[in-house]
Amino acid sequence: MDGGMGGELIRRGVGAETGLWSAEALVSAPQAVVDTHRSYIEAGARIITTNSYSSIPSYLAKRGLENRFIELTRLAGALARSAVEGTLETVRVAGGLPPLAESYRPDLVPTDGEARPIYRAMAQALEPNVDLFLCETMSCVRESRNAAIAAKEAARARSLPVYLSWTLSEEAEAGLRSGESIETAFASVRDLELDGFLFNCTHSDAIEHGIEILSDLTDKPIGGYPNRFVVPPGWSLDNPVEVQPRVDFGTQLFVAAAERCVQRGASLFGGCCGIGPEDIAALTEALGPDS
């Protein structure tokens, strides 16, 4: 899989650490999104995720752009598709469905009545340009069901796979950020017959533990994509609480974590916030381009 989009755009001078975050590039520098996708493809990624993480009404409303969320989500899908076209390798586009309020905040998850129409509109906007759906950074059972149900509806037209990725507590055995266990989360979506399960945007140790659990629960593809930050309680994009970089998680430790996850049964692995093309290139070199 690829690595983080928002942080990489900021590093290239076209994202924003607050406000619209990665959606800033959709508005002002769409070619930078294509270029970033291509950097990950050149690094060896065979699944890239659309830059739709912050094309959500709550973020866009900060600039009075909330009515453009469908347009910008559709653009995110088209940009990812254009990045894939002409490549010599088979690269799949994952349509990303994110939290609709803040990451890691189960206490801020919108009601089902608010969330499902937004997820449905986003999934339908992405569908023409994606090869699968990825409901990512889901912090609680209810959030993951709302996103997955919408993805499954949009996926029916072309029988697209739907993957679900939960974000875990930074503590290795504490379950989802909501406190719900991995077993409970998995059981809650069993009826949806999803196609793969992952963990993302959390400590690699938590992901390794989670993969051990998932390997006993399902024969479907499993995997993870850790971040390079520690997220303190109460964080949101625009508040003064700052995330702390994991200076102890360099490229080689990232690769080593990936190798351990593969040994535990992972068939999908990549990076989230703070993981860049150079990390994915090292992962490709370690595992082999056709792994």
Image: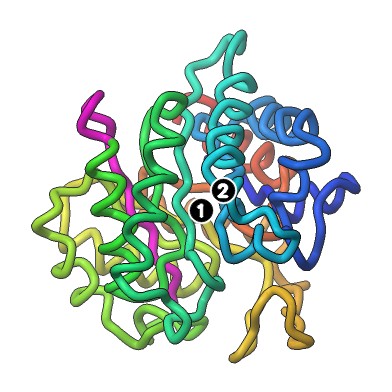
Inter-mark Cα distance, 1 to 2: 34 Å
Looking at marks 1 and 2 on the same chain, the residue that comes earlier in the sequence is marked by 2
Residue type at the position of mark 2: Phe
Pick the front one: 89 or 125: 125
- How busy is the neighbourhood of tag 1: few (under 14 within 10 Å), some, or many (20 plus)? many
Residue at (37% x, 72% y) in the render: 209
Residue type at the position of mark 1: Ala
Query: Is 172 above or below relative to 273?
Result: below
Q: Position of residue 91 (x, y in %)?
A: 50, 23
Magenta stretch: includes residue 159: yes
Q: Position of residue 86 (x, y in %)?
A: 61, 8
The dot on residue 258 is: 1
Please give left or right for residue 159 compared with residue 36 in the image. Answer: left
Q: Position of residue 257 (x, y in %)?
A: 53, 60
Return the residue found at the far bottom: 233
Please give left or right for residue 232 compared with residue 185 in the image. Answer: right
Magenta-highlighted residues = 155-168
Magenta stretch: includes residue 24: no
Q: Quadrant of residue 58?
A: bottom right
The residue that label 2 is drawn on is 69
